[in-house]
């Protein structure tokens, strides 16, 4: 049986043969199956790289409409390679210094959300004030407006792919909770 290594915490996972493979890592509780997991078989006998064969499509590789049946990236169907946007700046900038600076920023945050796209930690860039001019609250018959402006949102930036994410600031979270619990 080949060993399984958690892609998140890099811990080798040993499971009971009667129960079968784990769905979640017992150490970090992250999901092991699905689009986030890449299984790599390691063969100790072949230490040298074999020359790569030329990729050549034959007529059998296409369906009736002329669409290639083989995956584009050479991987299994349904998997997309994970590319961190920050990696393309590696030659022009010192990414080790960047990573250290990101760690220092993250150490001073009360909350550290994960990016929905690449699962890197996000840095708090600041807060944004939402006022009456740009926001029209949803009015529900049961509660009225969920949140009335003005309110503040925390703005987070991903350190790996630079996606931006918003969350309600602490004071306005409490205001939302109090508004929903009062009848």
Image (cartoon, rainbow, N blue to C red):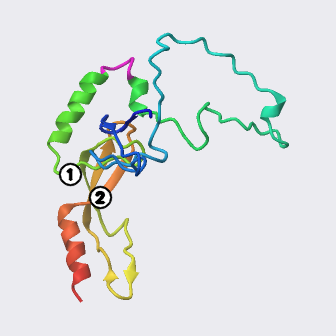
108 to the left or right of 121: left
Residue 83 location (% of width, % of height): 46, 33
Q: Secondary structure at mark 1?
A: loop
Q: Mark 2 and mark 1 in contact (Cβ < 8 Å)?
A: yes
Q: Nearer the viewer, residue 26 or 16?
A: 16
Q: On the picture, is 48 further left or further right than 89?
A: right
**Hey, which quadrant is residue 169 in on the image?**
bottom left
Q: CA distance from mark 1 to mark 2?
A: 11 Å
Q: Which mark is residue 111?
A: 1
Magenta stretch, main secondary structure class: loop
Name the residue at 38% across, 40% down: 162
> Compared to 41, does 126 lie above or below?
below
* Rendered view: 135 above or below 111: below
State which quarter of the image contains the C terminus: bottom left
Residue name at image x 42 percent, y 46 percent: 21
Mark 2 Cα within 10 Å, few/some/many (few <14, many 20+)? few
* Along the line of sight, the residue nearer the viewer: 151 or 146: 146
Q: Confirm whether the magenta stretch covers residue 36.
A: no
Residue beneath label 2, please? 167
Whole-percent x, y for residue 50 in the image: 57, 12
Q: Which mark is residue 177?
A: none
Residue in view at x 17 percent, y 65 percent: 171
Question: Mark 1 or 2, which is nearer the eye?
Answer: 1
Please tell me how crowded label 1 is: few (under 14), some (14-19), or many (20+) other residues with Cα within 10 Å.
Answer: few
Q: Is residue 183 above or below residue 121?
A: below
Q: Position of residue 117 (x, y in %)?
A: 42, 45
Secondary structure beneath dot 2 equals strand
Q: Which tag, 1 or 2, sits closer to the chain's start?
A: 1
Residue 116 at x, y = what percent? 39, 49
Q: Which residues are magenta?
A: 90-94
């Amino acid at each position: 049986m080949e060993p399984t290594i958690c892609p998140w915490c890099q811990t080798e996972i040993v499971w009971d043969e009667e129960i079968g493979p784990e769905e979640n890592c017992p150490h970090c509780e992250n999901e092991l199956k699905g689009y986030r997991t890449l299984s790599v078989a390691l063969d100790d006998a072949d230490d040298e790289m074999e020359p790569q064969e030329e990729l050549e499509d034959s007529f059998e590789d296409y369906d009736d409409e002329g669409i290639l049946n083989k995956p584009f990236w050479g991987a299994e169907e349904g998997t997309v390679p994970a590319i961190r946007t920050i990696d393309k700046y590696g030659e022009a900038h010192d990414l080790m210094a960047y990573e250290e600076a990101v760690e220092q920023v993250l150490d001073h945050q009360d909350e550290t959300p994960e990016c929905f796209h690449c699962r890197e930690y996000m840095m708090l860039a600041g807060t944004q004030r939402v006022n009456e001019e740009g926001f029209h609250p949803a009015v529900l018959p049961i509660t009225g407006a969920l949140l009335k402006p003005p309110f503040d949102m925390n703005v987070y930036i991903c350190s790996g792919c630079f996606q931006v994410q918003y969350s309600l600031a602490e004071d306005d979270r409490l205001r939302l909770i109090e508004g929903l619990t009062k009848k």
